[in-house]
Image (tube, rainbow, N blue to C red):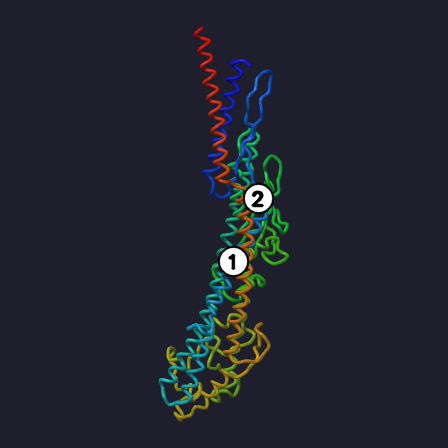
């Protein structure tokens, strides 16, 4: 081997090891960078004639695509479960439990207690005032829960609009990265950093809708949902959604009051087993808006209806006609069963007995339709109100069960129903968290290992030193020849 050949070999070795050191340092520097794929350097011997040495073929990016795909689906499932569970937890908090002050059950108990206390001394105005106050607080409790549910629907509506905007932006970014990766590969450049960025973008999409990545030629990829909707193949699809500025109980997707979702102008089911988008955060938000929240409102309205009808039943208050509103009204008028949706939010205390509306509390004793006070010791109407509240009655609507019970028992049934849904949602979230965490850990195990990279760096350092020493030795030999 000639001195020039030996020098060439040593120089190629220095170059290769310099590149290898750069790869290892990049791996270590990006140990915690989201989307980063561990790099390896591919080397090949040079064997042309009598020359030797080594050359860098490529910098490869190592990611287990199968494991990455499974982790993305786990991300979607976790986002779906967490969105539902958080909503159910918020509804449970709004409804409350009997042991929590201010809950619906505790307000019913306080109202019932005030009726009993007033019936024992019907001549005491402060006790009648307490009945009116507790009744108004109960009405406020129904309204607060109803407003909370509709507020959650409005929040879901806004989150849907944001998710759709994020999807459209991310799909366009993925399209642009596809083009950059394809162009860079054709020119022979390293595309690892571009692929890292594309992975982060697709991960963002996967939290909103469950997607799978399909390879195309020259580094390009396509995206399709697990439900079969093509999102990106050279050109991204366009998601369309029209946000409502305000949502009220009778606005639903089914009656056209709220917007669904379109892909390239075509309507698709936004959630449910038949939806091509089912399984991610977007589907969960639609379920919150169109299913979970409307169901909660339905059960609350059924309870409000039961209470209103108990106090407007014929004969309960002889001072009222069959068409008059009872103690509790539908926005000031007698409740009509055909207009039940949203009743809990429209519930009011009859203005005839509401001091805040100019009413007189003595009518709680003498009759809502009474024009003058009667005997102050007559507690018949107060006892009748108490019996109406505590008597067994089957709910006329809703899905809380077919058994007869008091208003308090039905309210307890509502709290139990919401609590069970919350428990089921928490269990689903716990399972999704465990699965996602395990898959993420498995993916990280195939990523950058700081100990392994440090060992590689020591080997590279030794090889670099050896090549540098050979160049020094060759230089000494050449200097010796020149001095001869």
Tell me the residue that label 1 is attached to.
83
Q: How many marks?
A: 2
**Residue 98 percent across, percent down from the top left:** 46, 74
Indicate whether 138 appears above or below 19: below
Where disc 1 sits, the SS reads helix
Is 360 or 2 nearer to us in this picture?
Answer: 2
Is the C terminus in the top left, top right, bottom left or bottom right quadrant? Answer: top left
Q: Quadrant of residue 140?
A: bottom left
> Is 316 drawn above or below residue 105 in the view shown?
below
Q: Position of residue 163 (x, y in %)?
A: 51, 52
Residue 372, by quadrant, is bottom left
Where does residue 240 sit, x and y in percent of width and height? 55, 51
Query: Is residue 156 placed above or below 406 in the rendered structure?
Result: above
Residue in front for this viewpoint, 135 or 50: 50
* Residue 259: percent from left, percent from top: 55, 57
Q: Which residue is mark 2?
A: 236
Marks 1/2: CA–CA distance: 26 Å
């Amino acid at each position: 081997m000639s001195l020039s050949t030996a020098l060439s070999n040593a120089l190629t070795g220095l170059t290769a090891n310099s590149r290898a050191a750069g790869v290892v340092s990049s791996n270590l520097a990006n140990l915690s960078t989201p989307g980063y794929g561990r790099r390896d350097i591919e080397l090949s011997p040079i064997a042309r004639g009598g020359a030797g040495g080594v050359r860098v073929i490529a910098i490869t990016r190592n990611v287990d695509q199968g494991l990455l795909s499974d982790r993305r689906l786990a991300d979607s499932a976790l986002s779906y479960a967490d969105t539902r569970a958080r909503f159910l937890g918020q509804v449970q908090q709004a409804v409350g439990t009997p042991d929590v002050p201010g809950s619906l059950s505790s307000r019913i108990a306080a109202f019932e207690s005030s009726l009993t206390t007033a019936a024992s001394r019907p001549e005491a105005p402060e006790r009648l005032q307490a009945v009116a106050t507790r009744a108004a607080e109960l009405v406020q409790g129904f309204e607060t829960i109803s407003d909370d549910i509709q507020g959650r629907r409005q929040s879901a509506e806004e989150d849907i609009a944001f998710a759709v905007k994020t999807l459209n932006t991310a799909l366009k970014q993925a399209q642009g990265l596809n083009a950059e990766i394809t162009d860079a590969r054709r020119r022979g450049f390293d595309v690892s950093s571009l692929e890292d960025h594309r992975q982060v973008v697709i991960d963002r999409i996967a939290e909103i809708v469950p997607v799978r990545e399909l390879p195309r030629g020259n580094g390009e990829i396509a995206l399709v949902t697990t439900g079969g909707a093509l999102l990106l193949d050279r050109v991204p699809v366009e998601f369309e959604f029209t946000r409502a500025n305000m949502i009220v109980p009778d606005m639903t997707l089914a009656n056209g009051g709220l917007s669904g979702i379109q892909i390239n102008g075509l309507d698709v089911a936004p959630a449910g087993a038949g939806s091509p988008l089912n399984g991610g955060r977007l589907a969960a938000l639609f379920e919150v808006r169109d299913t979970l929240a409307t169901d909660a409102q339905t059960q609350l309205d059924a309870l409000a209806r039961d209470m209103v009808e108990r106090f407007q039943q014929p004969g309960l208050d002889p001072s009222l006609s069959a068409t008059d509103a009872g103690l509790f009204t539908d926005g000031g008028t007698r409740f009509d069963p055909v207009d039940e949706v949203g009743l809990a939010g429209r519930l009011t205390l009859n203005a005839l007995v509401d001091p805040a509306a100019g009413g007189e509390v003595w009518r709680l004793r003498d009759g809502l339709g009474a024009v003058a006070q009667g005997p102050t010791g007559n507690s018949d109407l107060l006892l009748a109100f108490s019996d109406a509240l505590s008597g067994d009655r089957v709910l006329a609507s809703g899905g809380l069960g077919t058994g007869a019970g008091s208003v308090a028992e039905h309210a307890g049934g509502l709290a139990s129903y919401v609590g069970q849904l919350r428990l089921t949602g928490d269990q689903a979230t716990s399972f999704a968290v465990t699965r996602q965490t395990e898959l993420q850990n498995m993916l990280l195990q195939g990523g950058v290992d700081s100990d392994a990279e440090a060992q590689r760096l020591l080997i590279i350092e030794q090889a670099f030193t050896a090549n540098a020493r050979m160049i020094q030795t060759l230089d000494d030999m050449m200097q010796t020849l020149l001095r001869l």
